[in-house]
Amino acid sequence: MLPAILATTMFSHAAAASEISENLDISGFARGVAGYLDHNSRTFEGYTDELSIVEQSLIAIQPTYTFNDQFSLTSQLIAHAGDDRNSGLEWLYLNYHPDSAWHLRAGKLRMPFFIYSDSIDVGYSYPWVTAPVQVYNNYLFSTFNGASASYNHSGSEVGLNVEIYSGTFDGDIYLAGTRIDVDAKVSNLAGIVATINSNNLSMRLSYHTGQNDTTVPLIQDLREALYQNNFIESAQSLESSGNVYALQASLSYDRLNSFYKAEWIQTVTGFEIAPKVTGAYAMAGYIWNDWTVHATYSVSKYSEIEPVIELPTTPIGNPGIDQLSAAYYQAFTATPNGTLDSYTLGTRWDFRLDMALKAEVSKFQESRNPSGFFVNSGQSSKESAYLYQVAWEWIF
């Protein structure tokens, strides 16, 4: 009910604001997504074996107020139907265009990890119903507070865009697409993104780094108990602070009736218990009139982790030590350290200039478990399931 109320409020304010000033431009987007998972005891990205229409459905508006030829203010308000993401102000920043080549921004900005970072909520902007989860749902956070500067050069043969940014982050983080209850802070956040275009070919490279000072309440309590009992190495293996960085690379080739994309990212998380995750996908598509068909292979791999064998691995009759030992080894058992492969086939019909219908089926298969994406899963079996989805996309 809350997303519907928020959406109504957003549109009523938008309509009123558009009458106030001709300098105010309002655009927006919406998507309705239905999905079904053919697994009777697991959850994947919020989907179960009951049809759901709330996991990815949303509506948003993006007001931009132009002060003059150089300065403008952009914001985005979004209402999510599901509970896993917060509705409200997604971004708010001041734009400064000193000339046609430079673009400076300051405020709450989107983290530029990926090709579709700025438009990941705008389903109309990409061919899938769900962008490859092994890449787009493995990242730690989606926005930051700070500033960025980008330079764009358009040559006769080669185009170049370079962006640098700096800032901080304080909020929710995600692990295998699931929001986890932590007090997350990243300081000294900085990065550089370079995109090179030549004819139909585009290459994007980026590097991102920061100082992670995240507190995981349950892990923090366990670490303190380990230190108090002089299990120093075990406590250090649960460290959740340190340098975090990500490397990303992508390649796109677009023709009039076909397209090909590949993207790779590796993230070092700053968590000793889940130190590194790598994700990638490769896709190909064909366009015929208003129809698009596409196929994608995606994979993610967490670094393998092993607990420090300092605590007894079997009960020794000391209730305090036995309880501490069980909690320590359970923390490693519950942490993703597996591999997830997926195969997706999909189609899209652009039945109007501003609307599209999509349908796709994806097979998800753990080649090493647990991958972290199947909720209520454990170490006992490699999970596998099909996810069926349809979507309606709209931009306005």
Image (cartoon, rainbow, N blue to C red):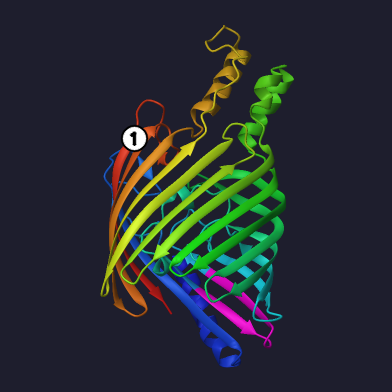
Residue 120 percent coordinates (x, y): 48, 62
Residue closer to the observer: 51 or 140: 140
Q: Quick one: quadrant of the C terminus?
A: bottom left
Q: Is residue 73 magenta?
A: yes
Q: Is residue 274 visible?
A: yes
User: Taking 237 as reference, is 48 left or right?
Assistant: left
- Residue situated in front as seen by the camera: 286 or 376: 286
Q: Which residue is depicted at the point 62% across and 43% down? A: 182
Residue 116 appearing in the image: no
Most foreground residue, 350 or 175: 350
Main secondary-structure element of the magenta-colored stretch: strand
Q: Quadrant of residue 215?
A: top right
Label 1 SS: loop
- Label 1 neighbourhood size at 10 Å, few (<14), some (14-19), many (20+)? many
Residue labelled with disc 1 = 383
At x 54%, y 19%, the residue is: 326
Position of residue 337 relative to residue 200, above or below, is: above
Q: Of all residues shown, which one is farthest toward the top? A: 317
Residue 218, above or below 295: above
x, y percentage for residue 176? 48, 44
In the image, taking residue 166 as reference, residue 269 lies left or right, namely: left
The image quarter in which residue 32 lies: bottom left
Q: How many marks?
A: 1
Q: Is residue 379 above or below residue 168?
A: above
Asked whether residue 382 is drawn in magenta, I would say no
Q: Name the residue: 71% across, 59% down.
A: 166
Residue stretch rendered in magenta on the structure: 61-77
